[in-house]
Structure formats: structure tokens, C-alpha cells
Image (cartoon, coloured by chain):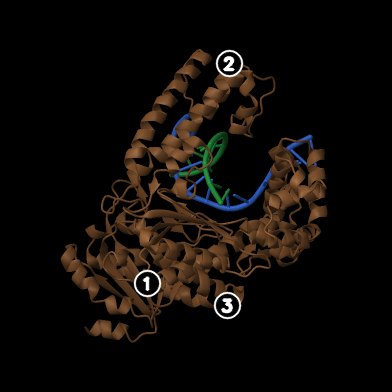
Chain colours: A brown, B green, C blue
Amino acid sequence: MLFLTFLITKRSISLDTETTSLSAIDAELVGLSFACEEGEAFYVSIPPERNEAEKRVKIFKPLYENEEIEKIGQNIKYDYEVLRNYGITIRGEFFDTMIAHYVIQPELRHNMDYLAETLLGYKTIHIDELIGPKGKNQKNMRSLSPTEVCDYACEDADITLRLKNVLKDKLKKSGADELFRKIEMPLIPVLAEMEINGVCLDTEALNETSRIFNERMNGYEQNIYELAGESFNISSPRQVGNILFGKLQIVDKPKKTRTGQYVTNEEVLQSLKAKHPIVENILAYRGMKKLLSTYIDALPKLINKRTGRIHTSFNQAATSTGRLSSSEPNLQNIPVRTDDGKEIRKCFIPEKGCLFFSADYSQIELRIMAHLSEDPNMIEAFRNNIDIHKVTAAKIWHENIDDVTETQRKKAKQANFGIIYGITTFGLAQRMGISNLEARKIIDGYFNTYPKVREFIDKSIKDARKKGYVETLFNRKRYLPDINSHNATVRGFAERNAINAPIQGSEADIIKVAMINIQQRFERENIRSKMILQVHDELNFSVIPEEKNLVENIVLEEMQRAYELNVPLVADAGWGNNWLEAH
DNA sequence: CCCAGCACGC
DNA sequence: GACGTACGTGCTGGGT
């Protein structure tokens, strides 16, 4: 075909797909668009009948799969997933304009309409102008004639190409070019494959849990109405506040929010448990309700009819630190802390006949802090592989390591976490339930223990003031315009970000490198087990039993050598028949 | 349709 | 005297 012959001579091509759904896993192709020169684009209409559609799409397989041709796209992970459903795997180097903009300035927006307007001064055709405003009457791409879709589709491919030409130079200037080419672009197919593969759920167990939890919740509900002397909506914080502090008046001076409503959160209610038996019933009701509505009753509805699995979206351009986020459903906040929560985690299972494998970095954020600050005491502790919280406690309170009490260790652990988040005296006191004075002493003891950590914190803030941004091990920047604010609260927030962003962001960089290398080794070594989830410092796999040892070796090895810190980078592994057992 | 309050994870 | 540890997503209620 002449058109294909023409396209395939190009070194670089911008592409876009028009489909019937925003969800890549369900989307059917309506059309393909291509652009190689600014101001020039091509549209190929795809017929609705599946066999005919596949025939038409397959014509372009040699183009999409050509390793030598760079593929430019705006959120190209979407097109990758749609085409995978048609037996096509996009190959070659990627240039994703959305992610290019994200690594240059993570806190801004990255959608195409915004980029076109700010970077090109061009107003694009908005999707609503084509298919009508959002709502149940919104038309489908398929219901339009090819000529109607053509202009829109060609514009997308053309604008994406123009954006690339602008962003290419901006990337070089930003210093994030290598981060973009070596980490973010190779990560795209890795995330796409994880999303496509999906995760299996034990729906029967979930149903049974739903039944039990609903029964328990109804019990709490009845108790609450009796104790309150009336029925009300327990899911309404406002109504709960009015009952507790208005009607029952269980405390003299109830705390209020800035909108004047009573505060009824977990922390407040925990402290008031002894005041009235209704309080613990409300806490228990809330716990049940949360688990039921967010997980137990919601997850089964998201099982894909075709695949029988749930397919999350990993958003690669969402956070200001470089972490991924997960949505629809969010699989990065599945409960693990409480026994009730664990019942949910138990329902995440591997594929039939497979094992669940979970590997997570041990103390990665503190290890990054040790590396960045070069604090000799912290480095020594990690090199000797001693429990870091125990070491911290021993040094703060001048104890022998074996004499450290559980309470001291817990406090030291809180202090270690506080350091990563940009500690304040008040924050630590609140969290530990101690006085500001005592918190101050712990922090002083902490900085005496790890003097270079304090130096690092001071230097990070100073640097941020001077440069206006901070950056990670892989030069991922975060701008902090508020760092010189005259408002102490606003400035304090920026200062805490100056500490936290390089640490959290470097963690994100490192695990992304590990994911890319793991996937590459799986391919090279013909591993059929699948990486299915990432939860910030943790990777999860569905593993074929025969590949058990191989997978564990590859995963731990690649996680641990993803980046050479001046302390060991350690990952731990767990196996089981579900996520809970493996974790 | 949007915000507030709350709660789950790291 | 107020403000207060980072980063997310999603549910419900309650106002428009």
C-alpha cells in the first residue's frame, strides 16, 4: 500500500487513535491519525465490524511495530493499550508530550488543550464541540461520519507533533532530558502491560465478607440510634457532630473546623471513647462503612466482563514528586492495617494455578536520606544492617542497643518518619501524644545523633531559596515558588516539600528503573509470570510455580541494583496464595 | 457540579 | 497567636 510505504520511510511519526471509550481496555478503534510534518496529517477510518476493522488496522502493523521509527503521542500509553487489543505492539522510541511536560513542570496541567494554548498559542477543537457536552446524551465517536472525525483526529496528531518540537528543546534546557528518555519513556510499555494484564479478585470471598460486614454495621447502627435517642445519618459528619456535641454534649469545648462544623474525625473520637459508649459505635460503624463502600462493594463492579479482572490506570503524570498514582480503582490504597482491612487484601489473588509474589524496598526513604546527607552514623547503621529505629533510639537516649524499650523504638520510628516529611516540633508532639517540650528534646537528640541530616535539611532549604526548586537523584525537579514567602505557614509548607520531594521523588525514580529492568529481563529470559501492581516501594507479581526461584532472583536483583547508593539498597520478598499472605 | 470532611495506602 | 509532617484517590453529604 502506497500510503504505508510513504509513512514507513519516516524516522519519526506522531500518532493518535479515535475510539469508542475513554477506557483503553474497552475501546474499539474508530480511526487512526498520523503526522510527520507540521501542518500535514492523515486520517484512516476504521469500520465498525470487528473482522473488517482488524484487517484495516493490521495494514499499519509494520509501521507501529517498526523499532527504527520514533512514536510521538499525547498519553501514548492509551494508544498502546488500544492497539494491543488489535494484536499490535507499538515499538521504537517514544516521545510522550504529556509526560515531557510533566517532567519539566510536574505541578502544572498536562492535557493537550492546555499545552496547545500555552505552548503554541493555538486553540484546539474541544471534544465537546464534536460529540456534545458531557452527560448521557453525549454522542459516540462511532456515531459521527468519518469526515466529521477526520479534522479532529488530524488536528490531534498535528498538534502533538508541534508540541513535541517545542518540548524537545525545553526538555534539554530543563536538565530532565535523560530522566525522560531513560526512565519515563521506557516505563510506558511496562505500565501498559501491567494495566492490560489486570488483577484477579476472589469475588466469592468478597461477597461473604460483604454479608458479614453489613450485618455488623447494622448492629452498630441500631446501637447508635438507641444511645442517641433518635435516628440520623451516621455517614454525615455534620449530623454526628450535632448529636455528640449538640444533643449529648459529651465534652465542654468541642473542636470546630474552619467552616464552623464540629470535628468528628478518628483522632477526636478516639480521645472521647471513655465519655460515652456511642463514640466507639460510631468509630466502628465508620470503619465498616468505609471498607464496604470503597472496596468490598465497589471492586466487584469494576471487574471487566471480557477479561474477568480489574484493570487499574497507573497515572504517570499526576503527582508533584514523581510517584505514580492509581485510579479506577485505586489499587495503591488497599487496606492492610486492621484485621477487617486484611480481609479485603486477602481477596486479591494471582492467576489460576499461580502464586502471589510481593517484593518491597526496606526503609528506602531513610536510606536515601543517609545517601543524600552522607551522615556517618546513619550510613554506619545501614551498612551494618541494624534495625534503624533501634539504633536511632539508642543514640537519642544513650542506651545500649539491646536495652532499647519498645516505647523508645516507637518514638524513634516516629522521629525517623517525621524527618522524611519535614519535621516540626508541634507535628511530632501531636503524633506522639507528648508535650512540645518533649518533642523538642527528641528532635534535638535526633540531630545530635545524625548531625549531617540537620546540615542536609538546612542546605536543602537554602538551595531551594536560591534556585527556586529542588531535585531528585535523577534530576527530577520540583519548583517551590513559596519558599521565599513572607507568610510563615506558606513558607513552612514549601520548606517541608524541599526536604520531602527529593527523597520521595528519588524513591520513585529508583523503583521505576527497577520496573523497566525487571520487565526487560522477563522478556529476555522468556518469563511468563506477570508484574501486576506497584505501590510506591513495592512490586507485586502473579507467578507461575515453575518460575518461582527465577522470578524471585530477578526481581530482588533488579530492585537492589537499580541505583547505587552509599548504603545497601535492600528488598524483601514474600510469597502466598493472595496479596495478604505475600505481603 | 463542587466542596468539605473523612479515611484508606505509602 | 495561629499554624502546623509528605504524596495520592474515593466515598458521602450537603450546598449550588
Number of dots carrying numbers:
3
Which part of the image, by quadrant, shows the N terminus of chain A? bottom left
Residue bearing the label numbered 1? A157
| Chain of the residue displaying label 3 | A
- Left or right of A404? Residue A508 is left
Residue bearing the label numbered 3? A172
Quarter of the image for residue A527 reads bottom left
- Is disc 1 surrounded by few (<14), some (14 to 19) or many (20+) residues within 10 Å? many
Instruction: Give whichever of discs 1 and 3 has the lower sequence position.
Output: 1
Give how far across and how far down residue A173 sits, in percent: 60, 76
Question: Label 2 sits on what residue type?
Answer: Lys
Residue bearing the label numbered 2? A247
C-alpha gap between disc 1 and disc 3: 23 Å
Q: Residue at x 27, y 59 (%)?
A: A141
| Chain of the residue displaying label 1 | A
Give how far across and how far down residue A132 sits, in percent: 32, 53
Question: Label 3 sits on what residue type?
Answer: Lys
- Left or right of A402? Residue A349 is left
Q: Label 2 near label 1: C-beta < 8 Å? A: no
As helix, strand or loop, the secondary structure at mark 1 comes to helix
C-alpha gap between disc 2 and disc 3: 63 Å
- Is disc 3 surrounded by few (<14), some (14 to 19) or many (20+) residues within 10 Å? few
Q: A284 above or below A379?
A: above
C-alpha gap between disc 1 and disc 2: 62 Å
Q: A266 above or below A189?
A: above
Instruction: Give whichever of discs 1 and 2 has the lower sequence position.
Output: 1
A258 or A372: nearer the viewer: A372
As helix, strand or loop, the secondary structure at mark 2 comes to helix
On whether disc 2 and disc 3 are found on a single subunit, the reply is: yes
A444 or A61: nearer the viewer: A444
- Whether residue A102 can be seen here: no
- Left or right of A503? Residue A51 is left
